[in-house]
Image: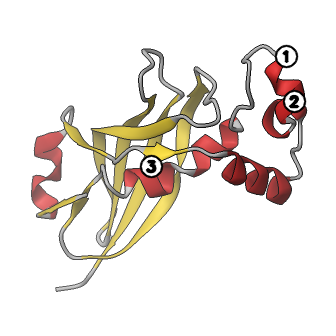
Amino acid sequence: MSVIPAEELSNHIGEETGRSQWFAIDQERINAFSKVTLDDQWIHTDIDAAKGGPFGTTIAHGFLTLSLLSYLTSESTMLPEGALMIINYGSDKVRFLSPVKVGSRVRAVSVLSAVTQKAPDQILIESAVTVEIEGEEKPALVANVLTLAIMGGT
């Protein structure tokens, strides 16, 4: 994550703001997500059945990969100096393009798309985020991630 003066954010629209570290997706994490979300479809949790399935192994839930955006983009986002709080404001145009097989590593690549002053003390930051899968050409997902920076008074 890089922190720059708020008035300079717009100067970086269209630029890559960072890449996260690679993050491993293991079966334990997939199982834990399954338990929390009550989504125990066999392609995620049944190792033996998944071997004979379309991917040859278990895969992460698409929503597991999506839920990791907060963590992954914390390393790849550009934020304004003086922010008191950073809020996940949502995501637009989320697309799951390729399954994340168990044992894969993923990372987020962020490009600053837009900066909008929402209120005198609020800046909305839009980033085009691609979650790459190590060693694969096609990404796991793409999304426009919205982050709201609550700025401190001067």
Q: Name the residue under label 1.
A: 52
Q: Where is residue 98 in the image (x, y as percent from the top left)?
A: 59, 21
**What residue is shown at x 74% (from left), y 53% (from top)?**
33
Q: Which mark is residue 146?
A: 3
Q: Which amino acid does label 2 sit on?
A: Asp
Q: Where is residue 43 in the image (x, y as percent from the top left)?
A: 82, 30
Cα–Cα span, label 2 and label 1: 7 Å
Q: Considering the numbered disc 2 on the image, is that residue within a helix, a strand or a loop?
A: helix
Residue 154 image-quadrant placement: bottom left
State how many labels appear.
Answer: 3
Cα–Cα span, label 3 and label 1: 39 Å
Q: In this view, does 144 lie to the left or right of 96?
A: left
Q: Position of residue 44 (x, y in %)?
A: 79, 36
Residue closest to the eye, 77 or 39: 39
| Front: mark 3 or 1 | 1
Label 2 Cα crowd, 10 Å radius (few <14 / some 14-19 / many 20+) = few
Q: Name the residue under label 2.
A: 48
Cα–Cα span, label 3 and label 2: 39 Å
Q: Which amino acid does label 1 sit on?
A: Gly
Q: In this view, does 94 lie above or below 117?
A: above
Label 1 Cα crowd, 10 Å radius (few <14 / some 14-19 / many 20+) = few
Q: Which of marks 1 and 3 precedes in the sequence?
A: 1
**What residue is shown at x 41% (from left), y 56% (from top)?**
147
